[in-house]
Amino acid sequence: MLNTKKEEPAMNDLCKKEDVRLLVHEFYAAVRKDSILGPIFNDVAQVDWDAHLPIMVTFWESLLLKTDRYRRNALEPHLKLFKEIAFRQEMMDRWLMNFDATMDSHFQGETAEKAKDWARGIAHNLQRQIRKQGGLQIKEPGG
């Protein structure tokens, strides 16, 4: 029997600056359109995307490609935001879902998996810091 199914080309791992740029730009494009995250980023935080995206590219390059170029406090703007609005677990769940979906649609390999691990660590640390400042609100199931 003849196999007529076309095989998808194998995806590459995330290994160069252009890859990180693609990841960041595609991820935040999804975030901006997200029904939960979009209003937070666009309306509440009023993110200047032209300024923010290069910062996020530098952040992820530092983590994944070990460029050591990121010199900011990544937690500070998030903690400031969550003094203004209540943090809900669904926000972080959606952030991680969008991150994983973006990663999985463009990359596969060891660094891609490390990036997803980093994202989970970042989420955990952010939640811990928000809890310390008293801003964490967990929505109860069915509530």
Image (cartoon, helix red, strand yellow):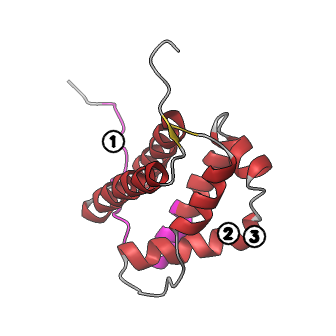
Front residue of 102 and 119: 119
Q: Which residue is mark 3?
A: 50
Mark 1 or mark 3: name the one nearer the start of the chain. 1
Q: Which residue is mark 2?
A: 52
**Residue type pointed to by label 1:** Glu
Determine if the magenta segment contains residue 21.
Answer: yes
Instruction: Give x and y (percent) for residue 95.
Output: 51, 45
Mark 1 and mark 2 residues within 8 Å of each other at the beta carbon? no
Query: Which residue is depicted at the point 65% across and 55% down?
Result: 81
Query: Which residue is depicted at the point 57% across and 59% down?
Result: 79
Mark 3 and mark 2 residues within 8 Å of each other at the beta carbon? yes
**Residue type pointed to by label 2:** His
Judged from the image, the secondary structure of the residue bearing numbered disc 1 is loop
Q: Residue furthest top?
A: 142
Judged from the image, the secondary structure of the residue bearing numbered disc 2 is helix
Q: Which residue is mark 1?
A: 7
Determine the CA span between mark 1 and mark 3: 37 Å
Q: Residues within 10 Å of mark 3 (few under 14, many from 20)?
A: few
- The part of the chain drawn in magenta is 4-23
Determine the CA span between mark 3 and mark 2: 6 Å
